[in-house]
Image (cartoon, grey):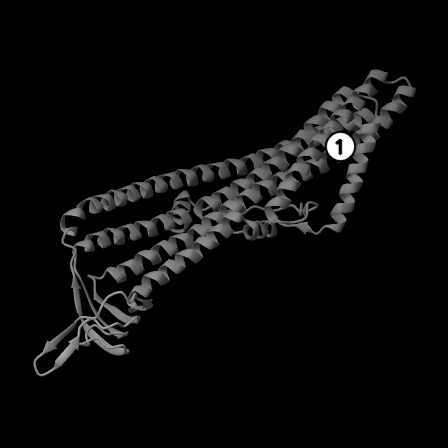
Amino acid sequence: MKTTVSLLALALLHGVVTAQTPALTLDEAVRLAQQHSTAVKVNAADQGAALARVQQARDRYLPNVTANLSYVRISDNIRPFTVSLPEVGAVELNPQILNQSYNNIAVRQLLWAGGAVKLGIRAAEREAEALRLEAGQHQLQAADNVTRIWQNLYLLATSEQLIRQNVRLLTDRRRDVTNLEKQGIVLKNDGLKIDLAISTLEASLVEIQTGRAINTFNLATATGSSEQVAIDTTDFSLPTDVAPLTDYLADAQQNRPELLALGQRREAALIGKRLVELNRMPTLSLGGSYDYNRPNQRVFPNKPEFTGTWQAGAFLSFTLSGLYTNRAKETESRYGLERLNTALDQVRDGIRMEVNAAYQTYLKARQQISLAQTAIGQATENFRIEQNRLRAGASTPTDFLEANTRQLQAQLNLRTAKADARLALWQLQKSTGKVTY
């Protein structure tokens, strides 16, 4: 009696919560999970940083401008040195200019570096694109997580509905058996068997309530929703046609985010290899500077006043040691590229096996639905016959309970097969990277 009252209270509480909380459909749950995913948010931050690195690479086209300003006060313990020059007279070579200031602004513009700047930009863009593509992978993972939770809740909710219907049916039959007991047609033990069956079903309801509480909390956490979130348990239909396996394999090669991202990183590695080889090349730049100093060392003799001077020229830089120190870097970049090529092959093979497994699982799930539908028709007809026989007193409660158990199990098997098929379809779509909700 306590168990029945507790279950009734839980059912009433669930009814109140469901009435107040809008039912969440699967596509809504997926959308919320993707918005709430920390992995997606981290990826968005990584994309922002990658775009900043692209801009840094582009900034190498801009001139390099530096400015240096200084003021110094020197000691007065050095005596000036004076010499006499013909036709000039006495000249003080080391005048006491105690307050000195040296100010310089310089501009350097890179003209040629073997294409290193352009290649650096392309490499940064490839990495940024790889991170953008990886966002799709994180979104798929978030969707996969919430889809599994949602499917668990759907199966628990529909199972609970069937079991509660069965409890009500057995309760009605218990009243019939009670009347037959009073008439002496059946034994008291037959009624106890129905009571035991009801108690077993109520125990199953307790397990279902626990599973629903766990999965509801997980769904709320994954979607950032209230902990009282409810799901839409409206029945669903599956597509009637299944495309050939080759179509799904082709879609996976074109759409899987991790494969596309790895392809972009391979392109970046190829560019990086060329960049390393360019370390052997010289660089050419133009530049100039302007000095405004007190005293200006180009003025003779030095005077305690500001004087501006400038210079301009072309600069050729060549790191000769790079001719022999760059070999190890080139070897490293070559092995890094080989590693990425191997990783690409490994990912391709893994994706092909994943798609095939998901495809075969979905075909199996569709067959299980067909078998379950046949079984439920047989079990329903058997239950109808046994129920009529029990009412007529021509059968025992044991036979009725066996028929009822078979019917309930067939109903649960059909719901489970449908839920498994829907999850299998999702896994197939996810394996191709071409998802529709």
Which of the two residues, 373 or 26, is positioned nearer the viewer here?
26
Q: Is mark 1 on a helix, strand or loop?
A: helix
Up the image or down, 162 lies above or below 237; here it is above
Across and down, in percent, residue 398 comes to 76, 20
Q: Mark 1 points at which residue?
A: 166
Q: Which residue is drawn at 52% across and 40% down?
A: 424
**Local crowd at mark 1 within 10 Å, few (<14), some, or many (≥20)?**
some
Which of the two residues, 247 or 206, is positioned nearer the viewer here?
206
Which of the two residues, 53 or 309, is positioned nearer the viewer here?
309
**Left/right of residue 143 with respect to residue 225 in the rendered view:** left
Q: Residue at x 60, y 41 (%)?
A: 149
Instruction: Indicate the amino acid at tag 1.
Output: Asn
Q: Quadrant of residue 317?
A: bottom left
Across and down, in percent, residue 138 comes to 48, 48
Judged from this view, the residue extending furthest toward the bottom is: 87
Q: Which residue is drawn at 21% across and 62% down?
A: 113
For the question of whether residue 105 can be seen, the reply is yes
**Left/right of residue 187 with respect to residue 422 in the rendered view:** right
Up the image or down, 307 lies above or below 348; here it is below
Which of the two residues, 78 or 144, is positioned nearer the viewer here?
78
For the question of whether residue 240 can be seen, the reply is no
Across and down, in percent, residue 261 comes to 38, 50
Across and down, in percent, residue 47 comes to 43, 55
